[in-house]
């Protein structure tokens, strides 16, 4: 069940999943390279055998910072409570690596993945912390709980925005299932993949919204999940459904998207 795009934080085995972050001095295969995350395994508090899980790299508009999601160290932990995903940032000029949210209490308040930089320096990300949803529950005199998605498989990830120093966290999308992989378009709007289960749709469609969460609308995908497959003699599509993930805008305004099946493709897909 690991390779299921609806499962964002599955249990991981220490020996099976780990990653490191590297930087090359220039865009050449032979350029000198440095492992950025090696410093987490050195020093008085570092474990030289520590392993981490890393994903979702994003580069700032000025090219001077890199944000990514990381959890760890992976070691002895309860199967139902794997390490928390946090947003980390590496600053190239100062060669510094730090977790964006400094407070341990606030950082552990949710699972944070898929960062993206807004033009004003704030960081957009997907999280289970559901800040405003929980505030509404509190206003209604109800317990604050982490809402699960409509399939009841895990907590719902929705889009949040925070300052570059991890303060002023604010929820901008509201969905019973997950909103993932945001990216900022040239026109300033945010494009992301929404697990849309409304009216039996049950598919990942592309949505756009303003950075403050207003004017949220479908961009592409509904009724278009059999694109690219041949048709049989009855003019019906054959082949599995595809989901639209990790969209990016190219310089000419077109979108490049990872089109992939929901499960069973070993983290594969087709760039379209």
Image (cartoon, rainbow, N blue to C red):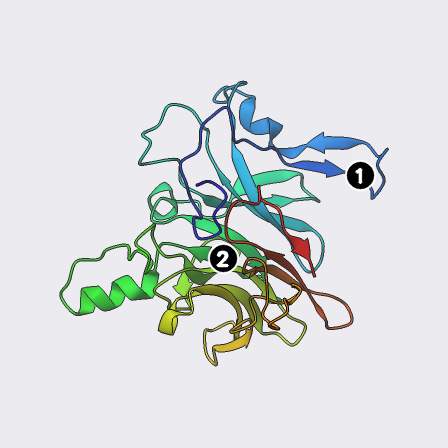
**On-image quarter of the C terminus:** bottom right
* Residue at 37% from the left image edge and 41% from the top image edge: 104
**Position of 272 relative to 235 (above/below):** above
Residue 175 picture quarter: bottom left
**On-image quarter of the N terminus:** top left
Is there any visible trace of residue 168 in the rendered image? no
Q: Which mark is residue 203?
A: none
Is there any visible trace of residue 98 in the rendered image? yes
In front: mark 2 or mark 1?
Answer: 2
**Residue 38, x across and y down, in percent:** 61, 27
Which of these two is toward me, 78 or 104?
78
Residue 122 picture quarter: bottom right
Residue 22 picture quarter: top right
Q: If you read the primary sequence from the N terminus, does the residue marked by circle 2 or circle 1 appear first?
A: 1
Q: Secondary structure at mark 1?
A: loop
Which residue is labeled 2 in the image?
Answer: 125
**Position of 5 relative to 204 (above/below):** above
Q: Is residue 249 toward the left or the right of residue 148 in the image?
A: right
Q: Mark 2–mark 1 contact, CB under 8 Å?
A: no
Residue placed farthest to the left in the image? Answer: 141
| Alpha carbon separation for disc pair 2 and 1 | 27 Å
Which residue is labeled 1 in the image?
Answer: 25
- Decide: few, some or many residues near mark 1? Use Cα within 10 Å; few <14, some 14-19, many ≥20: few
């Amino acid at each position: 069940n690991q390779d299921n795009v609806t499962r964002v934080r599955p249990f991981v085995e220490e020996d099976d999943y780990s990653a490191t972050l590297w930087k090359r001095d220039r865009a050449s295969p032979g350029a000198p390279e440095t492992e950025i995350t090696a410093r987490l395994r050195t020093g008085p508090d570092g474990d030289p055998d520590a392993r981490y899980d890393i994903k979702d790299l994003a580069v700032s508009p000025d090219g001077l910072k890199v944000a990514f999601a990381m959890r760890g160290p992976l070691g002895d932990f309860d199967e139902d409570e794997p390490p928390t995903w946090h947003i980390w940032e590496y600053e190239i000029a100062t060669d510094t690596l730090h977790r964006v949210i400094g407070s341990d209490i606030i950082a552990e308040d949710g699972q944070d993945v898929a960062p993206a930089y807004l033009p004003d320096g704030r960081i957009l990300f997907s999280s289970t912390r559901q800040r405003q949803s929980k505030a509404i529950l509190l206003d209604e005199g109800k317990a604050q709980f982490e809402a699960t998605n409509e399939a009841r498989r895990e907590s719902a990830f929705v889009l949040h925005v925070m300052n570059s120093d991890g303060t002023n966290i604010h929820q901008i999308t509201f969905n019973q299932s997950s909103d993932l992989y945001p990216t900022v378009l040239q026109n300033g709007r945010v494009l992301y993949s929404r697990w849309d289960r409304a009216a039996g749709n049950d598919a990942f469609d592309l949505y756009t919204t303003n950075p403050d969460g207003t004017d949220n609308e479908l961009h592409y995908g509904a009724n278009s999940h059999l694109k690219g497959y041949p048709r049989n003699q009855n003019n019906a599509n054959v082949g599995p459904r595809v989901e639209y993930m990790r969209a990016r805008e190219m310089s000419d305004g077109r979108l490049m998207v990872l089109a992939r099946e929901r499960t069973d493709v070993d983290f594969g897909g087709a760039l379209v």
